[in-house]
């Protein structure tokens, strides 16, 4: 008999004579009540075993983690907590699970322990919920852009360019580690490498996406990106997924409008389509926060926080205004910041971003017009800026509890200005000849941004560590699984 998903059984509108469910045992109580989960929903279905007519040997094999199939009648449940349950007529053990050895015991495990068992943690309520929300969010990303007529572009994973110019790249090579071919002056001879040149894993698909925007108008990427930055924080991964829209003829204000509309759309989509999972995650967060001192607890519960973002405009604040606010702030005056803000031009650290968002504005913030010196080479230089105080049309979106969730800009569309900038930064023209062609042939104002997908999932699920919102996190010293 075909089996029915637990979600559909629980949502049934009537009792059913005979149904089959397949899944994994979460708990087995009183030799009678199985809580069965198949991943289709956070909820388990209760399966009531007729223990008097079930062989003792079979009952013993109904253990946490075992895969089973049950067939029986779907009846209204007498017990609290569920509308329907299955009165089991036939039970088959599909795969045993040694209760002594199965790591996912029906009790609270630390997140650290669960990370070490990332292949099994998805069998817990929390990780099942997180991964379903993640999946729904990625669908919403595509839905949003597709509805608006954007073209989905797959930019290369292996590339020769450093899009961010930050040099935090994983090298890709097929050369042997020992006995590496060398040129006469002793350098590694990449001409003999697979691609005949030095290559790396992409840090961003932006530059390639720009070339496509200059033909298709509106494009977006959604793919893995890699950064070899040694940041062992709760916000950084070495491998993360980024969404990068790029739009011809959009200026910075259009770019902000697009980013805000997009973020609100995907959050709303999750709120509308993941109600049970988000309710569970809200409870999890409340529970976790009970162990924190009052001052560190969030002011809003998870769903309230999500709705707050949906209902309020993001505050748009220039870098210069932000610096003035930070200079005058209590933590700056009392030297509570690790990096004190002394003058215009300072790069903002996450402590500053979080102060602005969580303490000062108490709302998502879009910071724009940053000093040119602290931003990437491709950003549009503002007209009429004072020498020494040049700014670029950059924007970062900062979120409560997360910090930077989006980084983007209007792009420098003027060939001469772009080349000059690259010269100053020591970026070889020959390396980016193809990128410069977009400015040579039919250049136009255009803008785009990158949203770190895991940071979005962090925000929506209320989790505190980015390692817990991607199935198999890649971080310094960790590439297990
Ligand atoms: O600010 P970033 O570095 O911008 C770019 O890569 C641009 N090329 C985007 C564009 O304009 N098309 O990265 C964009 C976003 C950040 O705001 C952050 O959300 C996320 O990517 N991000 C990371 N997420 C997880 N782990 C890391 N190590 C991340 N680095 C950046
Ligand atoms: Mg950034």
Image (tube, rainbow, N blue to C red):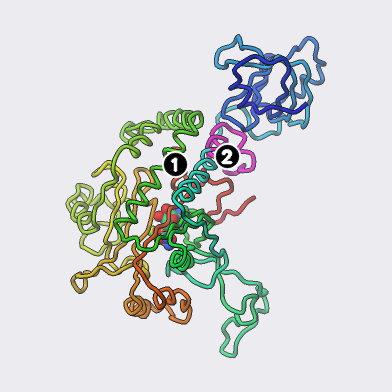
Q: Residue at x 48, y 78 (%)?
A: 431
- Dividing the image into 4 quarters, which one contains the N terminus? top right
Q: Which residue is mark 1?
A: 464
**Residue 42 is drawn in which quadrant?**
top right
Task: Tell whether position 51 is magenta.
Answer: no
Q: Residue at x 18, y 71 (%)?
A: 386
Q: Residue at x 60, y 44 (%)?
A: 116
- The residue segment tinted magenta is 110-132
Badge 2 density bin: few <14, some 14–19, many ≥20, Cα 10 Å: some
Instruction: Give the distance between the C-alpha atoms of the residues marked 1 and 2, in whole angstroms.
Output: 14 Å
Give the SS element for disc 2: helix
Q: Which residue is mark 2?
A: 114
Count of all numbered marks drawn on residues in the image: 2
Q: Nearer the viewer, mark 1 or mark 2?
A: 1
Task: Tell whether position 112 is magenta.
Answer: yes
Badge 1 density bin: few <14, some 14–19, many ≥20, Cα 10 Å: some
Q: Is residue 420 left or right of residue 96?
A: left
Near-viewer residue (118 or 16)? 16
> Quadrant for ligand 1?
bottom left
Mark 2 close to ligand 1, CB under 8 Å: no
* Image vertical order of residue 249 relative to residue 106, above or below: below
């Amino acid at each position: 008999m075909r089996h029915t998903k637990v979600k559909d059984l629980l949502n049934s509108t009537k009792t059913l004579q005979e149904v089959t469910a397949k899944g994994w045992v979460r708990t087995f109580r009183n030799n009678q009540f199985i809580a069965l989960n198949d991943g289709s929903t956070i909820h388990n279905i209760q399966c009531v075993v007729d223990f008097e007519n079930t062989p003792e040997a079979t009952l013993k094999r109904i253990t946490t983690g075992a895969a089973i199939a049950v067939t029986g009648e779907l009846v209204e449940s007498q017990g609290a907590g569920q509308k329907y349950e299955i009165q089991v007529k036939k039970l088959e053990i599909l795969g045993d699970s040694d209760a002594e050895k199965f790591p996912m015991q029906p009790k609270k495990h630390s997140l650290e322990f669960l990370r070490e068992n990332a292949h099994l943690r998805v069998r817990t309520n929390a990780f099942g919920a997180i991964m379903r929300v993640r999946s729904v969010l990625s669908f919403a990303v595509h839905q949003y852009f597709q509805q608006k007529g954007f073209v989905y572009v797959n930019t290369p994973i292996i590339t020769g360019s450093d899009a961010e110019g930050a040099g935090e790249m994983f090298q890709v090579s097929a050369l042997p580690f020992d006995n590496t071919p060398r040129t006469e002056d002793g350098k590694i001879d990449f001409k003999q490498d697979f691609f005949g040149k030095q290559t790396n894993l992409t840090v961003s698909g932006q530059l390639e996406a720009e070339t496509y925007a200059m033909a298709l108008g509106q494009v977006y990427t959604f793919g893995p990106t890699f950064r070899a930055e040694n940041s062992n924080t709760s916000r950084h991964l070495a491998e993360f997924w980024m969404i990068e829209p790029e739009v011809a003829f959009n200026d910075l204000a259009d770019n902000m409008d697009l980013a805000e509309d997009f973020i609100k759309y995907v959050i709303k989509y999750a709120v509308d389509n993941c109600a049970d999972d988000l309710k569970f995650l809200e409870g999890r967060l409340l529970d976790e926060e009970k162990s924190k001192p009052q001052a560190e607890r969030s002011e809003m519960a998870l769903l309230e926080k999500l709705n707050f973002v949906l209902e309020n405009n993001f505050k748009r604040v220039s870098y210069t205004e932000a610096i003035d606010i930070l200079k005058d702030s209590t933590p700056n005056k009392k030297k509570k910041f690790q990096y004190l803000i002394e003058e215009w031009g300072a790069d903002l650290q996450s402590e500053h971003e979080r102060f602005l968002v969580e303490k000062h504005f108490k709302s998502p913030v879009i910071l724009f017009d940053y000093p040119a010196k602290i931003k990437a080479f491709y950003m549009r230089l503002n007209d009429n800026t004072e020498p020494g105080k040049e700014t670029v049309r950059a924007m970062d979106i900062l979120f409560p509890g997360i910090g930077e969730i989006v980084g983007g800009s209007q792009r420098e569309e003027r060939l001469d200005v772009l080349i000059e900038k690259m010269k100053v930064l020591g970026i070889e023209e020959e390396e980016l000849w193809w990128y410069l062609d977009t400015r040579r042939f039919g250049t136009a104002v255009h803008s785009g941004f990158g949203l770190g997908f895991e940071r979005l999932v962090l925000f929506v699920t209320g989790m505190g560590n980015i390692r817990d919102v991607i199935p198999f996190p890649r971080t310094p010293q960790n590439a297990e699984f």
